[in-house]
């Protein structure tokens, strides 16, 4: 591939990010005696007719969405005795944003699914699981804890409604948040004792405000932040955008750039320009804040790499030379097959917290 084509590819990747954060993709794992296997649901007529009534209803709930509808719903149907990992692995051929488990998922299966998601997120996986009462303390797991979910005379569990929540999150565009998303079909839900404490504990629940039933603040189960982890990992909207930016940026470079050109300073600069255009496209589409993004060669990481190489060979003179180099000089150094990039940008949040003063005269 000619190097200038990378800019075009990354601009296309930016469009993919914007599309996905406007209308996401839902995946479901369901247990049923019929239609075992993987199904792509674009419309209700695609739902296998021989599935159980509860499973068909769960798929239809996931398709409702919120501001938009999910772009597609992938359904992995497994037998009653199949391991939950079987259903999860069957979905590996597809990229999706939110995952829900069986409507009667057990506590053991919910915990196992959370661990599968956490393990996969170390790789290129962007899915986030909506699970009933799983305090995973991880941005990839959404801990949905609502009880007594009522639609007329019918009461649902959190497991039965997890797919509906996944659909709401997938149907929330980048510039919006699912916080206070109304579920118009619901007529009641059990109240929580301390909503603020539950939000701080990484719980997602439902609120009956007397007019409608709506989603609480849209948070992940993440409550403990590592030294280098940003607070944004606690918010579903921000994690979703960050996941997709990372996914499309990295996979585009891996697929279309890696191993295809010499690791020269000039070629690295071309890569930086391509990434700058990638972020500019995201700024224009309100995914990240205007003027906040950029791409540069990571001078400190280059210094660390060169020092490790010199120290490994016991070359004291080289250690001294590297230590004396300016940042600009470091960026022009030969780093073998390694390319050290520093990419940055401020992912935009939505309006959620209002402070209104009414002055009566």
Image (cartoon, rainbow, N blue to C red):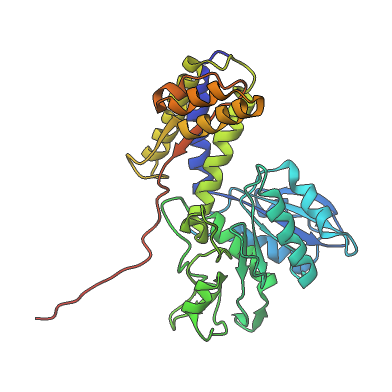
Q: Is residue 99 left or right of residue 217?
A: right
Up/down of 291 relative to 35, above or below: above
Residue 131 x %, y %: 67, 66
Q: Quadrant of the C terminus?
A: bottom left
- Outermost residue on the left side: it is 361
Instruction: Report the label total.
Output: 0
Residue 270 x %, y %: 46, 19
Residue 108 x %, y %: 79, 69
Q: Is residue 195 left or right of residue 259?
A: left
Q: Is residue 52 left or right of residue 263?
A: right
Residue 155 x %, y %: 66, 81
Up/down of 269 relative to 24, above or below: above
Residue 68 visible? The answer is no
Residue 113's image quarter?
Answer: bottom right
Residue 196 visible? The answer is yes
Residue 93's image quarter?
Answer: top right
Identify which residue, 5 or 173, lies in the foreground: 5
Identify which residue, 60 or 2, lies in the foreground: 2
Q: Quadrant of the N terminus?
A: top right
Identify which residue, 10 or 301, lies in the foreground: 301
Identify which residue, 300 or 243, lies in the foreground: 300
Task: Say which residue appears at 62% left-offset and 23% top-offset.
Answer: 258
Task: Say which residue appears at 40% left-offset and 24% top-offset.
Answer: 328
């Amino acid at each position: 591939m000619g190097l200038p084509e990378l800019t075009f590819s990354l601009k296309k990747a930016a469009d993919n990010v914007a599309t996905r954060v406007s209308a996401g993709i839902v995946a479901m794992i369901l247990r049923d005696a019929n239609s075992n296997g993987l199904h792509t649901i674009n419309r209700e007529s695609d739902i296998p007719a021989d599935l159980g009534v509860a499973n068909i209803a769960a798929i239809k709930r996931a398709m409702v969405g919120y501001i938009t509808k999910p772009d597609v719903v992938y359904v992995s149907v497994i037998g009653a005795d199949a391991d939950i990992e079987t259903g999860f692995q069957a979905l590996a051929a597809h990229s999706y944003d939110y995952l829900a488990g069986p409507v009667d998922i057990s506590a053991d299966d919910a915990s196992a699914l959370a661990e599968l998601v956490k393990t996969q997120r170390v790789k290129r996986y962007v899915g986030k699981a909506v699970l009933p009462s799983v305090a995973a303390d991880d941005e990839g797991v959404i801990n949905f804890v609502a009880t007594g979910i009522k639609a007329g005379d019918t009461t649902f569990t959190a497991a039965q409604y997890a797919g509906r929540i996944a659909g709401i999150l997938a149907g929330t565009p980048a510039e919006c948040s699912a916080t206070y998303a109304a579920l118009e079909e619901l007529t009641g839900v059990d109240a929580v004792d301390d909503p603020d404490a539950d939000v701080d504990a990484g719980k997602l629940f439902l609120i009956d405000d007397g007019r409608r039933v709506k989603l609480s603040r849209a948070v992940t189960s993440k409550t403990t932040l590592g030294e280098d982890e940003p607070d944004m990992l606690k918010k579903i909207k921000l994690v979703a955008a960050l996941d997709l930016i990372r996914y499309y940026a990295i996979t585009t470079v891996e697929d279309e750039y890696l191993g295809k050109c010499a690791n020269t300073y000039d070629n690295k600069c071309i890569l930086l320009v391509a990434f700058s255009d990638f972020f500019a496209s995201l700024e224009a589409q309100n995914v990240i804040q205007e003027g906040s993004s950029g791409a540069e060669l990571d001078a400190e990481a280059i210094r660390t790499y060169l020092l490790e190489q010199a120290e490994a060979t016991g070359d004291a003179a080289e250690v001294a030379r590297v230590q004396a180099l300016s940042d600009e000089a470091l960026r022009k150094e030969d780093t073998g097959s390694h390319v050290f990039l520093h990419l940055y940008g401020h992912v935009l949040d939505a309006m959620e917290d209002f402070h209104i003063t009414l002055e009566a005269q």
